[in-house]
Amino acid sequence: MEGAMVQAEAAKGRGLGLSELAPRVVQSEIRAMTVESDRVGGVNLAQGVCDTEVPDVVAEGAIKAIRDGHNIYTRLDGIPRLRRAIAEKTERMQGLVVDPEREVLVTSGATGAFHAVAMALFDPGDEVLLFEPFYGYHVGTLRSLRVVPVAVELEGPDWKLNVDRVRAAITPKTRAVVVNTPSNPAGKIFTRAELEALAEVAREHDLFVLTDEIYEHFVYGDAKHVSPAVIEGMRERTIVMSGYSKTFSVTGWRIGYVIADAKWVGAIGYFHDLLYVCAPSPFQHGVADGIEQLGQTFYARLALEHEVKRTMILSALKDAGMTPHVPDGAYYVLASTAGLEHVLEGTNAAERSRSLLKKTGVAAVAGSAFFRAGKGEDLLRFCFAKKDEDLEEACRRLRGLR
Ligand code: PLP
């Protein structure tokens, strides 16, 4: 009798309920601050949404594609014209020769790229190194696949790579290192020398290097964007992920891509197909038009315009009494609020960002969102990819803090 009851209990299985991971999931600070900012009618410098103009050729290309009937699934690796355009611009700008038929996969944003890459390359329990401050989606995606993210600290204030820290973090379970250059949130650009040092470690320990280059065109001053894929001997083990969300201000279109050795692309494409089937067809056409028709002056102007915005926000943050880290790329500033205890309430970054929103109507993200627990509590992240009038208004409000 007792045995039958035990059997019946066992046959019931786990019943209704969330996965083991789900209850531990917390809403991202970025989304939380966006909601908060909208609620109080603030200027949102929290979310990395560039609200600058979409280039005409890109917008018109997508509209025309819809009218021309490009509204059905595309090949799982994307339309040939877009893959060719991506391969050509990669060769032109980085000197990396890429086969558009076998080594390019069009994805649902760089986010979809990262997810599919992680599914294709890693097993549960594998460890993957990321540099801190890190981009939360990288960490969250790895965790969602039961892959263990291991943070390796970059050394502030310039966020220098200390390769000894990388070596110290490697265990027999380590499979890859994630690079994000230019980075969110620090605006760090890995130098060629740093990438060469990292490449040596990757070769020595037979690791993949996953590189998220979504901000490749947002580079300021003398800084140069270098992809780990161009470092000698790195082509086979480097998976490049990038996209057009930021470059063409089309974050909602979901057009990204992977460039990798053909032997990895098949499996990455398989998992991307399971997740997304394909990237949206008309938007693939619009982005292909943009890459084909916009020349070097477009990219140079994009960087220059954002460099001006960077100067604006840095000056306002200093006037507000904060100490900003100067980013070499991307479009975020991490600024220290140390010394502002008398104006900003709260003992941690999440509380201070809410206090800042209350006092100035400017939303920023708590720096702690980009670090392991207990770190980044004096930092706030400000996004400056905003229309000039909105950024000017945010700067005016920030200056009023003191
Ligand atoms: N990677 C980084 C480092 C980002 O900061 C972002 C957006 O904020 C993304 C990827 C998202 O890119 P996509 O819109 O192509 O998915």
Image (spheres, rainbow, N blue to C red):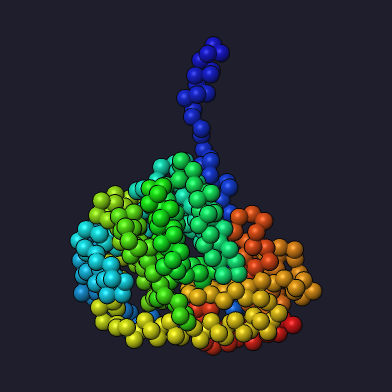
The answer to whether residue 320 is seen in the rendering is yes
Q: Is residue 379 above or below residue 267?
A: below
What residue sits 24% from the left and 54% below the top? 262
In this rendering, the count of numbered labels is 0
The answer to whether residue 144 is seen in the rendering is no
Query: Splitting the image into 4 quarters, where does residue 36 fall?
Result: bottom right
Q: Residue furthest top?
A: 1
Query: Splitting the image into 4 quarters, where does residue 41 fall?
Result: bottom right
Instruction: Give 180 or 252, whichever is nearer the viewer.
Output: 180
What residue sits 33% from the left and 65% below the top? 230
Q: Is residue 212 left or right of residue 156?
A: left
What residue sits 54% from the left and 65% below the top? 160
| Whole-percent x, y for residue 87 in the image | 25, 68
Q: Is residue 29 above or below residue 273?
A: below
What residue sits 43% from the left and 53% below the top? 201
| Whole-percent x, y for residue 216 in the image | 40, 72
| Whole-percent x, y for residue 327 in the image | 53, 75
| Whole-percent x, y for residue 124 in the image | 44, 41
Q: Quadrant of the N terminus?
A: top right
Q: Quadrant of the C terminus?
A: bottom right
Q: Is residue 375 left or right of residue 98?
A: right
Instruction: Give 346 or 276, whichever is nearer the viewer.
Output: 346
Q: Is residue 249 above or below residue 73?
A: below
